[in-house]
Image (cartoon, helix red, strand yellow):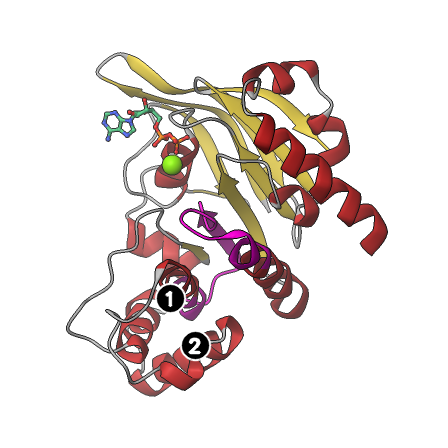
Amino acid sequence: MLVVEGLVKSFYGFKAVNNVSFTVERSEILGLIGPNGSGKSTIFNMLSGTFPPTAGSMRFDGAELAGLAPHRIINRGIGRTFQIPRPFHRLTIFENVALAGYFGQGRHSRAKAEEAAERALAMVGLSTDRHAGVDGLGAAGLKKLELAKALATGPKLLLADESLGGLDESEMDQAADMLRKIRDELGITIIWVEHIMGVLMRVVDRVMVLDHGEKISEGLPGEVAGDPRVIEVYLGTDADATQAAAALARRRTER
Ligand SMILES: Nc1ncnc2c1ncn2[C@@H]1O[C@H](COP(=O)(O)OP(=O)(O)O)[C@@H](O)[C@H]1O
Ligand SMILES: [Mg+2]
């Protein structure tokens, strides 16, 4: 579905993403992990058209994405969430999601956008509160709203950025299960970015690890968690390693 080759992003000579290549298969969940500042969000910003790559290509369903404006990329079927949610505070939850649906689906029909919003809100479990404002949503609620907005744009590929940030342990588990449900029930392909390995390892099909803008490892969760280069990068974060090991153990018992 997605073929990324030799992707580079330089900011004033600093290579935030340095020659990264990867592919995404239809209907898989690819985990993209790496420490803070390793280039994960920058990859999402290029895939979603926030800024063009300095070099490299990104082919989605066979067509090049580099150089396309964000709304063209959304219309081609790539939706994203943002690491820092910035909803419209004077609109209701439902209006925020319907607006994303309206623009994301090419501004054709208000009715279609509202239908998409209803479906998206039901998927993330925000239906009952949909006519309330967004200010009552906590961290977990705002993450759900971000997901609903992305889903309402009708994506084939969903880019989920740091869905677990600011959540407690049970909320993290719920968020992970929600991403899996989105893939299983809607058939949406997902790239899921996190800086911690944790519960991500339980849900993803494959993982890719970035460090200082470069890909340092890629493979099945079990392989990547045992890769000496990955352990080195995550050394000193014992809590994370323990969490990842626990998640892998749960993955084994679940399947
Ligand atoms: N628009 C920008 N201008 C300058 N530097 C940036 C910009 N965006 C990101 N960076 C830098 O690029 C590096 C990678 O950032 P980012 O992709 O946000 O990391 P991650 O999402 O993995 O934490 C960081 O050093 C960050 O400061
Ligand atoms: Mg980031």
Can residue 12 be seen here? The reply is yes
The residue at 69%/14% (across/down) is: 228
Asked if residue 134 is positioned above or below residue 172 in the image, the reply reads: below
The residue at 79%/42% (across/down) is: 249
Report how far apart the C-alphas of labels 1 and 2 lie in the structure.
8 Å
Q: Which kind of residue does numbered mark 2 sit on?
A: Leu
Near mark 1 (Cα within 10 A), the count class, few <14, some 14-19 or many ≥20, is many
Q: Name the residue under label 2.
A: 126
Left or right of 235, for residue 47: left
Q: Nearer the viewer, residue 255 or 13?
A: 255
Stretch of the chain drawn in magenta: 148-173
Quadrant (top left, top right, bottom left, bottom right) of the C terminus = bottom right
The residue at 46%/26% (across/down) is: 35
Task: Please check the rendered image and state whether residue 158 is part of the magenta-colored stretch, yes or no.
Answer: yes
Q: Nearer the viewer, residue 227 or 57?
A: 227
Residue 118 horizontal/vertical position (percent):
43, 82
Can residue 61 be seen here? The reply is no
Is disc 1 in contact with disc 2, using a CB cutoff of under 8 Å? yes
Residue 144 horizontal/vertical position (percent):
43, 64
Residue 71 horizontal/vertical position (percent):
30, 56
Task: Please check the rendered image and state whether residue 165 is part of the magenta-colored stretch, yes or no.
Answer: yes
Q: Mark 1 points at which residue?
A: 145
Instruction: Confirm if mark 2 falls within 8 A of ligand 2.
Output: no
